Amino acid sequence: MIRVGVLGAKGRMGATVAAAVTTAADGPQALASIRQQSFDLLVIDLKLPGLDGLSVIREAKRLQPALAVIIITAYASIESAISAMKSGAFDYITKPFTAKEILDAIAARTRRQQPLRERVEALVEQQRRQAGADWSHELLTPLNGILGGLQLLELEAETMGPTEI
């Protein structure tokens, strides 16, 4: 059964951090959720019923390439850590873990993504301004006004008499 709820935790500065959380009982349910909606973060166990965590990660990254992934496992090994990172996980946390470990991993990812997000937003804004400048230049060009007027005259010429033109 998938549950949606809100996770609350204390951040570094004592502020409460809240996030919408979707849980799944097994790998196939996790993938079904990922197919239905977009997520910012996937925290997944390596050992899951129905479909292992690495398989879920591979498919999740195919569906949502920007998805951040944290692996949790009680069966840590160098091989599984390497496989997890190659599959797209950015962190690998062993059980038992604390809420602080998860929150620190999320904070580290957020810090790494922030410059990229800011750069993308700046590029989008630059393109928006440029498109607006190009469009306004076209509207303000006198030749466009003249050509537009001539087109209107051509359309109306059939209904106008020779003295009205």
Image: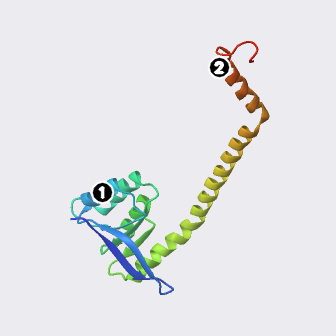
Residue 152: x and y in percent read: 67, 24
Which residue ends up furthest to the right in the rendered image?
A: 142
Q: Quadrant of the C terminus?
A: top right
Q: Secondary structure at mark 1?
A: helix
The amino acid type, in three-letter code, at marker 1 is: Leu
Mark 2–mark 1 distance (CA, rounded to whole Å): 59 Å
Q: Residue at x 27, y 67 (%)?
A: 47
Residue 41: x and y in percent read: 41, 65
Read off the residue under disc 1.
31
Local packing at callout 1 (Cα closer than 10 Å; few below 14, some 14-19, many 20+) is: some
Residue 137 horizontal side relative to residue 118, left or right:
right
Which residue ends up furthest to the bottom in the rendered image?
A: 14
Q: How many marks?
A: 2
Q: Residue at x 46, y 82 (%)?
A: 11
Question: Which one is closest to the eye, mark 2 or mark 1?
Answer: 2
The amino acid type, in three-letter code, at marker 2 is: Leu
Which residue ends up furthest to the top in the rendered image?
A: 162
Circle 2/circle 1 CB separation < 8 Å:
no
The image shows residue 147, relative to residue 64, as above or below, that is above
State the image quarter where residue 123 is shown: bottom right
Read off the residue under disc 2.
155
Which disc number belongs to residue 127? none
Q: Residue at x 40, y 55 (%)?
A: 61
The image shows residue 96, relative to residue 124, as above or below, that is below
State the image quarter where residue 117 is shown: bottom right
Specify whether residue 137 is in view.
yes
Residue 131 horizontal side relative to residue 101, left or right:
right
